Amino acid sequence: MSLNVEREVAALQRMTVRQLRNKYVEVFGEETNGHNKPWLVRRIAWRMQAAAEGGLSERARRLAGELARDADIRLNPPPMKDRRELNETPIRELPFQADERLPPPGTIITRQYKGRMLQVRVLTHGFEHEGEVYPSLSAVARAITGSHCNGYLFFRLARKGGEA
């Protein structure tokens, strides 16, 4: 490689992906879908080196052409499965297991905390406290206390033995 190409390749390493994409357009004359920096650097460096030093020899081009002619090339896309087969694929639904410590949706959990009576309504997908919906009991407990704690323990819904 000539000194100028080496300097250009070193400069490619310091470019951002956006700059490399612009350089790709400049060198190849077309845009790329690539956003992978190492790939862009290699492609651009290869093209710059080929332009500076002449690219493939005529013998190499001829050999590549012969190999391409001998290759098994698929002329038609692979056969598509019958649409009915695709739609008849059995779909197995997994049953949703609610935590056994939780009461059923619609139940109101109450707890006395720092002189206040707290009320939390159990929803099918979350918990409502003071007009706001939370994804978990721990999120409700965090909103109330200001620190992380186990929601089942905070609302005293843990199994016997204190385990949550």
Image (spheres, helix red, strand yellow):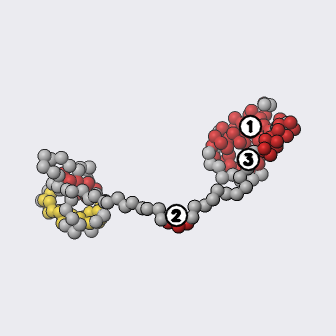
Residue at 62% x, 48% y: name it. 35
Sort mark 1 into few (<14), some (14-19) or many (20+) by Cα contacts within 10 Å: some
Amino acid type of the residue that numbered disc 3 sits on in the rendered structure: Asp
- Sequence order check: which comes first, mark 1 or mark 2? 1
Residue at 73% x, 47% y: name it. 72
Q: Where is residue 75 in the image (x, y as percent from the top left)?
A: 73, 55
- Tell me: residue 86, above or below residue 37: below
SS at badge 3? loop
48 vs 20, left or right, is right
Cα separation between marks 3 and 2: 30 Å
Residue at 12% x, 49% y: name it. 160
SS at badge 2? helix
Residue at 15% x, 51% y: name it. 159
Q: Report which quarter residue 36 is drawn in.
A: top right
In the rendered view of the protein, which quadrant contains the N terminus?
A: top right
Sort mark 2 into few (<14), some (14-19) or many (20+) by Cα contacts within 10 Å: few
Q: Residue 85 carries which label?
A: 2
Amino acid type of the residue that numbered disc 2 sits on in the rendered structure: Glu
Cα separation between marks 1 and 2: 55 Å
- Can I make out residue 121 in this image? no
2 vs 87, left or right, is right
119 and 145: which is toward the camera: 119
- Tell me: residue 113, above or below residue 163: below
Q: Position of residue 80 (x, y in %)?
A: 61, 61
**Residue identified by numbered label 1:** 8
Sort mark 3 into few (<14), some (14-19) or many (20+) by Cα contacts within 10 Å: few
Amino acid type of the residue that numbered disc 1 sits on in the rendered structure: Glu
- Sequence order check: which comes first, mark 3 or mark 1? 1
**Residue identified by numbered label 3:** 72
Q: Position of residue 163 (x, y in %)?
A: 18, 47
